[in-house]
Amino acid sequence: MVIMLKKVIIFILLTALFLPSKSSAQTQFDPQFIISDEEMQSTANWTSNDIQKFLQEKGSFLAILSAESINGQIKTAAEIIHESAFNYQINPKFLLVTLQKEQSLITDDTPTQKQLDWATGYGVCDSCDLNSDKLLKYKGFAKQVDNAAGIIRWYYNNTDKSFVKKKDQNTTIDDQIIIPQSWATAFLYTYTPHLHGNKNFWRIWNTWFAQIYPNGTLLRSASSSEVWLVQNKVKRKFKNQVTLLSRADPKMIVTVQETELSNYQIGQEISFPNYSILKNGADFYLLDYDSLRPFASEEVVKKIGYHPDEYIEISPDDIVGYSFGDVITASTTAPRGLIYQITDLNNSYYLFKDGTLYPITDKSIIAINYKDLIVEKHKKNNIKNLPVADLPLNFKDGTLLRVANSNNVYVVEDGKKRLIADTETFAALGYKRANVIAISALAAMNILNGEPIFINGSLISSRNKYLGDSAIKVDDIFGAKTPGYLVAEYPSGRIISGKNIDKPRSAASAVKLLVAYEALNQDFNLAKNSTYSKTKNIAKGNTLPMRNGAKIKNSDLFAAMLVGSANNAARLIAQSSGLTEKTFIAQINQRLENWGADDTKITDVTGMNEGNKSTPRNILKIFTRILENPNIKNALSKAKFTFSELPNGKIKAAKHTVTNSSQSASSANKNYNIIASKTGYTDEAGAVTLMLIEVKKSKKQYTVITMGAKDAKNTEANKIAKWISTGSLKIAEDN
């Protein structure tokens, strides 16, 4: 038996090692399939009250908006949306996403009248005159909502029209051949004939309405005591507390908004405690989670040790939908199961059930999966003749775990461990760090890898209200000389002025912000140390004068990269993350994809490569997101940073001082303080400057971004900062 177990473990280890690794998000944007026809035409059973709750949860201005409906009555925005969705039998979620995609109306708490008047972008084109008689008939919030829903229904009823794009037929979108795999996808391209807009639609849809919680997750609404189990894309309610305690641990319950629960169809109620004896007439069953195991007779029930007082009377309807397991006979041993602890085999553990031993590679599995089972101590000689299962047992679905001494957290689903991609995803899912179990590397290797979990488009949320994803025109009010720039309110992201904000340019050392962020989400621990290699970590451009073998605190290395923009520090950090540099860069690009920074591409970690591209609009998203990390924000606030290397044998521990050029720059009669900043410069990129400033008088904060400036001293960025901080400009509400 011992030899057999060793073979099993070795096989599983080897299998895990040679499985292809995937770093893709939970879902990838597929331009051929955005949403299904079922999703497009489902009314989702949402009432106007449901829509109102959703708007309130998002902090939307629409939650307090009343407007004239198409029938001339004053109604709430939620009522208008519900009425149009119901009349045309179109999903109200489609309308909500369209309102966000076109004018950011779900997350914008101070929209302009222009945003409301052209809420869904219906009838609007890039060259359209909004004051023309042809368009004025579509102007107004209710008209926009009604037309957006109505045109989709019209498309369904008129698929033969030549201009309506077709399911399963080639269509060209932005010079790319698309073959829509659903009519809904074809109609979205008919409505918005651009890849970017539809990718944005998909991203918002998946952020708000995708069923992202893995099987085994316990959910509860913030406004209710009912607890639900996510299982196979449905939610199953626990009938009572006793039933819940018999199957799950209440501390694992995740509290979500009610609208999150509405994404799931209702499945069969979990009505009976686990291991109940159910009696239907003369038939008896042992409930083993979702499986019913019939007893051969009532005599078998009694022989195994159950008393008639334990029987639960049921009707045939109570067991509809359950699967049936093996019959329990008089010869069946331990139908519920026992835990065997083999005292003279390194205290190894097995589940003994139905006469078979199932290996347990980590003791935590017992506490999670089999907390109610009796533990019996045995000698290996006592069990040598018992059959052993081929594969060891796994943690049940919904278990949160990490490998000891690692920061990576996984959730178990369908027998696989799914990496939770970053701390933001972990927090967004509502998980608690205290519920994460540390397991051995051996136990982890015996669990196959599943797809990582990302929160797609997580910038589009109630916490981050971005006008940057809308189609609102941005004017160059400032009249900047720099080729590309943007100034926006912080943290709302409302763009005040800009120029060429969607034109990709070399990003230079702005790349290092992403390096810092990614490293902190991998195994780069600020409390540990790294050793410099002049061969592995060598870099061009601005570098720290470090000797080969120099030992440095990771926290000092981190600050040296962000304050002094040291290129060799960036490479050392990337290579100390637990990933190869190539994989590290791939992870950054995947994260950018999920953040909605579609026009940003990273090719190296120093910013020296011309292939590092971004746009002012994308950098607004990235910079705002990254500033949420206090370690990064603190480093970006420093004008100067001095540190010493650590003693390392005969290598002299050098002292280094680095400076942040934008923080160090002084400005006479300055009206603002620089809260955080990062600069970069290459011949290709010119000067790239990112600043978060605070106006001294009003305490308002703004993001200033410049790209392509010829002056490496951040002159243009400071001019913009001075301009926005003077308060002399009256910013038009209809920008």
Image (tube, rainbow, N blue to C red):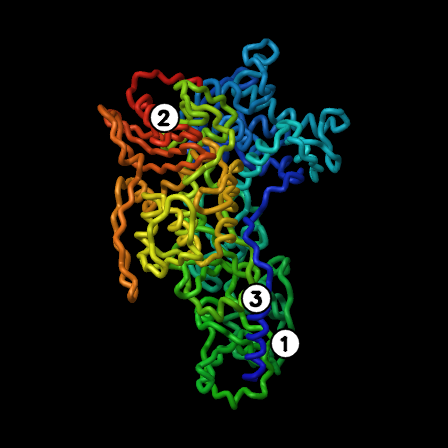
Name the kind of residue labelled 1 in the image. Answer: Ser
Between 360 and 405, the one lying in front of the other is: 405
Query: How far apart are the alpha carbons under marks 2 and 3?
Result: 54 Å
Q: Which image quarter: residue 562?
A: top left
In this rendering, the label closer to the viewer, 2 or 3: 2
Q: Is residue 634 above or below residue 574?
A: above
Q: Is residue 158 above or below residue 296?
A: above
Mark 2 or 3, nearer chain start: 3
Circle 3 SS class: helix
Between 365 and 361, the one lying in front of the other is: 361
> Residue drawn 26% across and 42% down?
640
Q: Which mark is residue 604?
A: none
Q: Which residue is mark 2?
A: 716
Q: Which residue is mark 3?
A: 16
**How many tags in the picture?**
3
Q: Is residue 648 above or below residue 183?
A: below
Q: Which residue is mark 1?
A: 297
Name the kind of residue labelled 2 in the image. Answer: Glu
Query: How far apart are the alpha carbons under marks 1 and 3?
Result: 44 Å
> Residue drawn 29% across and 19% down?
727
> Residue drawn 25% across and 25% down?
671
